[in-house]
Image (spheres, helix red, strand yellow):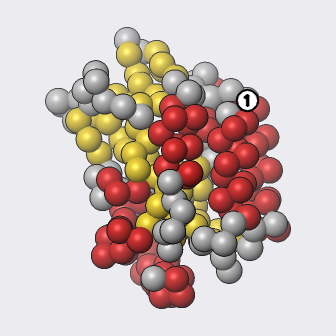
């Protein structure tokens, strides 16, 4: 196994578990993570791509001058900025040279609609550095399509990526839920021991 990805329902603790286990090795890890952006009342108002060095911050208060924001909810509408994947996410992937591990948290959504990002992602997955992260569930993407947050082509790209992860890139997709967290934690720890 060269790569490891968790799959499971939203806000079950997938990213939290990965972040806890990679914390001692952050200086050896490239890639990026997704941050949930909150308003002052704690409501989710968007999402941001952050470099792996900021991975331990699962959430952050939304500010208008914040970079890397690819999705924001304003006046009941989703404001998308897919160009962020050409900037922040692509830069994080390109700057992962010399790292021992690449964090890809989360993948499988809106970013797959950006051809240049898909190409860079596939280069990373076929490269020598192992990856760890979270793969969005197809059901989540379907819901996002229904809400017009992502383009329907992303559903197809998600299916292709999921297939390619296991068939082409030797990735292990681990189902995750809170009641099986201990088992997932063990699998991640074994995986990390191989590379860090």
Sort mark 1 into few (<14), some (14-19) or many (20+) by Cα contacts within 10 Å: some
Q: In this view, does 36 lie above or below 97?
A: above
Where disc 1 sits, the SS reads loop
Please state if 114 lies on the left or on the right of 53 as rendered.
Answer: right
Looking at the image, which residue is at 80% across and 50% down?
Answer: 160
Q: Which residue lies furthest to the front in this view?
A: 98
Residue 153 picture location, percent across and down: 76, 32
Q: Can residue 31 be seen in this view?
A: yes
**Rendered-image quadrant of the N terminus:** bottom right
Q: Residue furthest top?
A: 75
Q: Mark 1 points at which residue?
A: 152
Residue 105 picture location, percent across and down: 49, 54
**Rendered-image quadrant of the C terminus:** bottom left
Looking at the image, which residue is at 41% across and 25% down?
Answer: 72
Residue 168: quarter of image:
bottom right
Residue 110: quarter of image:
top right
Looking at the image, which residue is at 58% across and 34% down?
Answer: 86
Q: Is residue 105 visible?
A: no
Looking at the image, which residue is at 52% across and 83% down?
Answer: 195
Residue 136 picture location, percent across and down: 58, 50
């Amino acid at each position: 196994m060269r790569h490891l990805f968790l799959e499971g329902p939203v806000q079950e603790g997938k990213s939290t578990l990965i972040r806890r286990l990679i914390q001692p090795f952050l200086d050896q890890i490239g890639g990026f993570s997704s941050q949930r952006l909150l308003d002052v009342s704690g409501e989710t108002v968007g999402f941001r791509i952050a470099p792996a060095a900021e991975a331990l911050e699962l959430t952050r208060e939304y500010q208008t001058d914040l970079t890397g924001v690819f999705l924001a909810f304003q006046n009941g509408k989703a404001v998308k900025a897919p160009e962020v994947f050409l900037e922040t996410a692509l830069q994080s992937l390109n700057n992962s040279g010399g790292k021992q591990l690449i964090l890809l948290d989360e993948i499988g959504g809106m970013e797959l609609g950006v051809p240049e990002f898909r190409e860079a992602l596939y280069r990373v997955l076929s490269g020598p550095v192992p990856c760890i992260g979270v793969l969005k569930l197809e059901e989540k993407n379907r819901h996002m399509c229904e809400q017009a947050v992502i383009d329907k082509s992303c559903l197809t790209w998600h299916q292709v990526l999921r297939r390619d992860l296991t068939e082409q890139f030797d990735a292990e997709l681990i189902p995750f839920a809170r009641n099986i967290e201990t088992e997932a934690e063990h699998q991640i720890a074994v995986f990390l021991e191989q590379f860090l």
